[in-house]
Image: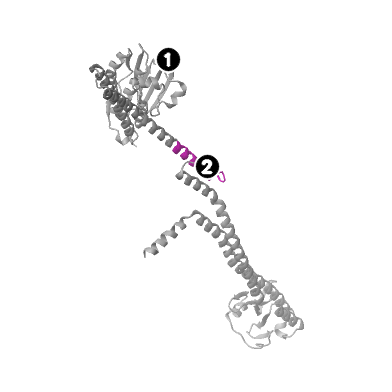
């Protein structure tokens, strides 16, 4: 039983093959019409041939019936001309003709079998009533036709009177039609078989040609499993494959970029974590080597080790913040927050740092703003931007924080008089561990993660951040966040 199920599972996957369904579709579309035609064509021919035969024989019988009235054959029953016409018609269509008078007596039989006998049949009775009747017996293979013999008389008032003198009952063989039909059927079957073979071959070749681009794309995707290919894939055979190729290349480039970013991130993290460890190792080794280290120098080294530990802890904390930022926005704790009060509190904490750098810190509120936000993350955004503005400022510089809002968004603008950002670096400032001036950043203790954390927190709030900067003139960061947070 299990083996049977395995076989079903093995072969069922082929039933989902596009090539199989494409092949079957082409074969059905090509072969089914041929089969239908091979069946319909002979039947159509038979019907048409029978109709033509009935029409021809009926016309001939009408002509002969007129001759019968002219020579008064129903009374005399003898005429070489009529006998010749009847014999010719009988031989031509391989049939039998009976001439029956109004008293149902057979006065002429081309087979000379039933002459002078009486015949009673529904068809003859209907013929004597003036009806022309025809029927085809498919089983026996003959056509039966009944034609009334009508004599036209002129009445006393000059009107024509139709007087039915008798009927002509004719049986016509259809052997020639049957033989032609059989030949036509044989030809139709042969054509159908040849067409079926042709369609199957064409369908197979088309399936190979049409699915070849998909094989190329499949092979390219398989290469990605093993490692990135050196060149992007572009299959231009069809519009659909070209679009798939473009989508694949986009995903491929994105994956490559993510992989490069991951490697760079790992390298940067390793370097950033290793640097404080190396410094602590050097300081600790210095203390261990020299046992007569003065207390003052010992204390200084210990303070340096403490600073390196704090720096290591700051890097780890920022990395943990980034990990949390990368998760879904469901982790936001949305509450109604007084943005004015929040900024005032952040600036109050940062003013001592600003005073040490001799930087003037100013808050300008254009209006009172209350918004549905995550208070901790908005505080982190303002803290990082203002802290950077202070750190990368010049002595006796200034930082201005401006709060404004409209009916949909509130805006926080952080403007400083600092060293500015070079134009070629603006596109990289949100990258993790990126520093515009690495030597200066290390001197002031930056980790290169602040702006990456800030941007992630803003995006979680469905907001935007823009920067304008000129070297030696200053930088302006503008944050725009919805007042009401909308959950997807």
- Using the image as rendered, state which of residue 416 and residue 449 is in the foreground: 449
Instruction: State the image quarter where residue 86 is shown.
Output: bottom right
Magenta residues, start to end: 229-256
483 in magenta: no
Q: Which residue is mark 1?
A: 473
Instruction: State the image quarter where residue 453 is shown.
Output: top left
| Coloring scheme used | one colour
- Name, please, the residue furthest toward the right: 80
Give percent across and percent down for residue 246.
51, 40
Question: At 44% from the left edge and 24% from the top edge, which residue is drawn?
Answer: 426
Q: CA distance from mark 1 to mark 2?
A: 46 Å
Question: At 48% from the left edge and 55% from the top edge, which residue is drawn?
Answer: 17
- Does any portion of residue 408 appear in the rendered image? no
235 in magenta: yes
Give percent across and percent down for residue 244.
50, 43
Is 379 positioned to the left or the right of 22 in the image?
Answer: left
Is 485 positioned to the left or the right of 151 in the image?
Answer: left
Graded by Cα atoms within 10 Å as few (under 14), some (14 to 19) or many (20 or more), the crowding at tag 1 reads few
Instruction: Point out the image quarter for the C terminus.
Output: top left
Q: Which mark is residue 342?
A: none
Give percent across and percent down for residue 328.
33, 36
- Using the image as rendered, state which of residue 487 and residue 11 is in the foreground: 11
Question: At 61% from the left edge and 62% from the top edge, which residue is drawn?
Answer: 195
- Does any portion of residue 205 appear in the rendered image? yes
Dot 2 falls on a residue whose secondary structure is loop
Q: Which residue is mark 2?
A: 233
Dot 1 falls on a residue whose secondary structure is loop
């Amino acid at each position: 039983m299990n083996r049977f199920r395995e076989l079903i599972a093995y072969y069922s996957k082929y039933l989902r093959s596009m090539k199989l369904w494409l092949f079957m579709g082409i074969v059905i579309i090509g072969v089914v019409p041929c089969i239908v035609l091979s069946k319909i064509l002979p039947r159509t021919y038979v019907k048409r041939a029978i109709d033509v035969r009935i029409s021809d024989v009926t016309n001939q019988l009408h002509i002969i019936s007129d001759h019968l009235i002219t020579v008064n054959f129903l009374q005399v029953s003898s005429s070489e001309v009529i006998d010749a016409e009847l014999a010719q018609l009988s031989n031509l269509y391989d049939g039998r003709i009976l001439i029956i008078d109004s008293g149902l007596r057979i006065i002429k039989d081309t087979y000379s079998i039933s002459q002078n006998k009486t015949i009673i049949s529904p068809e003859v009775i209907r013929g004597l009533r003036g009806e022309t009747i025809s029927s085809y017996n498919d089983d026996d293979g003959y056509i039966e036709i009944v034609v009334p013999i009508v004599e036209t008389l002129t009445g006393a008032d000059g009107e024509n009177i139709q007087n039915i003198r008798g009927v002509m009952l004719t049986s016509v063989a259809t052997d020639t039609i049957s033989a032609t039909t059989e030949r036509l059927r044989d030809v139709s079957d042969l054509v159908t078989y040849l067409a079926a073979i042709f369609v199957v071959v064409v369908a197979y070749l088309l399936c190979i040609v049409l699915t070849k681009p998909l094989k190329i794309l499949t092979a390219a995707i398989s290469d990605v499993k093993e490692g990135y290919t050196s060149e992007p894939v572009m299959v231009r055979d069809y519009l659909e494959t070209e679009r798939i190729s473009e989508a694949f290349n986009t995903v491929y480039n994105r994956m490559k970029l993510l992989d490069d970013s991951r490697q760079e991130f790992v390298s940067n993290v390793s370097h950033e974590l290793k640097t404080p460890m190396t410094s602590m190792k050097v300081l600790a080794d210095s203390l261990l080597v020299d046992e007569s280290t003065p207390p003052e120098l010992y204390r200084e080294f210990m303070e340096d080790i403490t600073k390196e530990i704090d720096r290591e802890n700051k890097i780890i904390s920022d990395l943990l913040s980034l990990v949390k930022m990368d998760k879904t926005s469901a982790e936001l704790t949305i509450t109604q927050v007084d943005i004015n009060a929040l900024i005032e509190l952040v600036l109050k904490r940062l003013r001592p740092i600003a005073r040490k750098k001799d930087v003037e810190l100013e808050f300008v509120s254009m209006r009172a703003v209350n918004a549905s936000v995550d208070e901790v993350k908005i505080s982190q955004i303002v803290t990082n931007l203002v802290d950077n503005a202070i750190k990368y400022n010049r002595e006796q510089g200034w930082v201005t924080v401006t709060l404004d809002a409209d009916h949909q968004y509130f805006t926080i603008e952080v403007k400083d008089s600092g060293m500015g950002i070079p134009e070629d670096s603006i596109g990289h400032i949100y990258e993790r561990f990126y520093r515009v001036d690495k030597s200066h950043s290390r001197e002031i203790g930056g980790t290169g993660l602040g702006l990456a954390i800030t941007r992630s927190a803003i995006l979680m709030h469905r907001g935007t951040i823009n920067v304008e900067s000129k070297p030696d003139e200053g930088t302006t960061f503008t944050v725009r966040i919805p007042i009401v947070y909308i959950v997807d």
